[in-house]
């Protein structure tokens, strides 16, 4: 019944605040449908732009998750990384989350590339170079490799400019 109320509030009434209260209740009291309630709760938090709460929710789930449940941990870290980078513009938190994802799946290319791009945005050229070179080693598709090589050339160019500037 509560799931039906939640569905009506979201779809027919577009009452996201009321739906959020029901979703929070379902999350707290629904151990059987835990993953479903986390997904619904997360989607509603996105709709009302409570991105800090999404981070808090998934950090809490990480604490409660078995270290052996790699897929769930990876999923939670992935949501934190994406939310931190895209919605909160918190590159430090995104960097932490992508790093945690790579501890679970060391060759996960999107996380490696994102770490390289975060390095470029933060002007941490060493990290950017390391991650993008790592990505280049993993990529088998030449079209994708061109983009990585272009970013690496940007890092090299930036390093050269910094060296010339330091010599003046």
Image: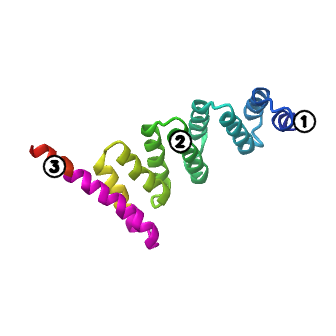
Left or right relative to 134: residue 107:
right
Left or right relative to 43: residue 126:
left
| Residue pictured at 83% horizontal, 38% vertical | 11
The kind of secondary structure element at disc 3 is helix
Q: Which residues are magenta?
A: 135-160
User: Measured along the vertical axis of the image, is residue 107 above or below residue 47?
Assistant: below
Tell me the crowding category of disc 2: few under 14, some 14 to 19, or many 20 or more residues within 10 angstroms, Cα based. Answer: few
Residue underneath mark 2: 86
* Contact? badges 2 and 3 (CB < 8 Å): no
Foreground tag (3 vs 1): 3
Residue underneath mark 1: 1
Foreground tag (2 vs 1): 2
The kind of secondary structure element at disc 2 is helix
Q: Is residue 150 magenta?
A: yes
Residue 152 rendering spot, x and y as whole percentages: 32, 59
| Residue pictured at 49% horizontal, 50% vertical | 101
Quadrant the C terminus occupies: top left
Residue 33 rendering spot, x and y as whole percentages: 77, 43
Tell me the crowding category of disc 3: few under 14, some 14 to 19, or many 20 or more residues within 10 angstroms, Cα based. Answer: few
* Contact? badges 2 and 1 (CB < 8 Å): no
Q: Nearer the viewer, residue 30 or 99?
A: 99
Q: Distance from label 2 to label 1 (Cα)?
A: 35 Å
Question: Which disc, if any, is residue 163?
Answer: 3
User: Measured along the vertical axis of the image, is residue 82 above or below residue 57?
Assistant: below
Res 65 → quadrant: top right
Q: How many labels, in total?
A: 3
Q: Is residue 91 magenta?
A: no
């Amino acid at each position: 019944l509560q799931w039906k109320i939640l569905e009506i509030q979201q779809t027919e009434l577009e009452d996201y605040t009321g739906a959020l209260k029901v979703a929070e209740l379902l999350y707290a009291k629904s151990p059987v449908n835990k993953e479903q309630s986390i997904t619904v709760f997360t989607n509603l938090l996105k709709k009302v732009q409570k991105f800090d709460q999404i981070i808090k929710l998934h950090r809490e789930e990480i604490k409660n998750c078995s270290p052996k449940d790699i897929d769930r941990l990876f999923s939670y870290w992935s949501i934190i990384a994406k939310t931190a980078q895209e919605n909160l513009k918190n590159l430090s938190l995104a960097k932490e989350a992508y790093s945690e994802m790579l501890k679970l799946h060391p060759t996960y290319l999107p996380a490696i590339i994102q770490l390289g791009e975060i390095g470029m945005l933060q002007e941490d050229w060493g990290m950017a170079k390391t991650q993008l070179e790592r990505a280049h080693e993993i990529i088998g598709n030449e079209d994708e490799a061109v983009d990585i090589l272009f970013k690496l050339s940007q890092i090299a160019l930036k390093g050269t400019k910094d060296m010339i500037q330091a010599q003046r």
